[in-house]
Image (cartoon, helix red, strand yellow):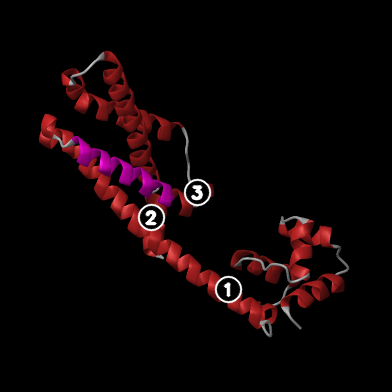
Amino acid sequence: MNFAQKMKSYRQKNNWTQQEVAERLNVSRKTISSWENSRSYPDIFMLVQISDLYRVSLDDLLREDHKMIDSYKQEHEINKKERRTFIFSYIINVIMSVILLAKPVIMGNLTLRKFTWVLVLALIFNTVVLLKYIDWKRLKMKYGFYICWLVLAVMQFELTASSLSVMPGDIHNYLGYVSGRVTGYILFGFCVTATIWLYPQFKSKIEQ
């Protein structure tokens, strides 16, 4: 008997409807139906809850269903790959953030603008990669996040503001340049703030 058949059998032995099981497991009735028809499988955490609900061992639930076991193995490999990608991207984000924060202080007006913008674009792209793999439920984006974002953006503006006063050209080119820089400061502040806020998740993945 495979997992789907066992789920239906255990439920019927307890004289429960799919809705009653769904309420006990805090999922939707469609989810229970999907499990009982082999359209999907519960995650490991939910599998433990099912084991407790029906008072059967995990071995009993998984035994004989090789397709389900292969699905868990595949999921485990995907999680490992995503974990490595997150760790690598986070470290790269930290390195680029430190360089961009220190660059105006170290080099002043001698900063190579093109190189700086390449780093900013790389930081933005890498942050997008990070956001793809984060656990949103664990991310606490409260007022502190926005305050930190604002402080970093303003700080970066203050450190490089002197370069805005020496830009040649007409008013239209100057305004375009300034607006581009301000947009860069806002995006840079967000990327660095996101990196700071993601540290707990980075730490937990390192410890896994």
| Residue underneath mark 1 | 72
| Residue at x 79% of width, y 57% of height | 29
User: Which is more foreground, mark 3 or mark 1?
Assistant: 1
Q: Nearer the viewer, residue 41 or 24?
A: 41
Q: CA distance from mark 2 to mark 1?
A: 23 Å
What amino acid is at disc 2? Phe
Viewer-proximal residue, 118 or 193? 118
Question: On residue 138, which mark appears?
Answer: 3
In the picture, the disc for residue 202 is 2
Give the mark, 3 or 2, whose residue is nearer the N terminus.
Answer: 3
Q: Residue at x 15, y 20 (%)?
A: 166
Q: Depth check: 173 or 10 in front?
A: 173
Q: Earlier in the sequence, mark 3 or mark 1?
A: 1
Is residue 122 part of the magenta span, yes or no?
yes
Quarter of the image holding residue 49?
bottom right
Q: Position of residue 37 (x, y in %)?
A: 78, 70
- Assign a secondary structure to mark 2: helix
Q: Quadrant of the N terminus?
A: bottom right
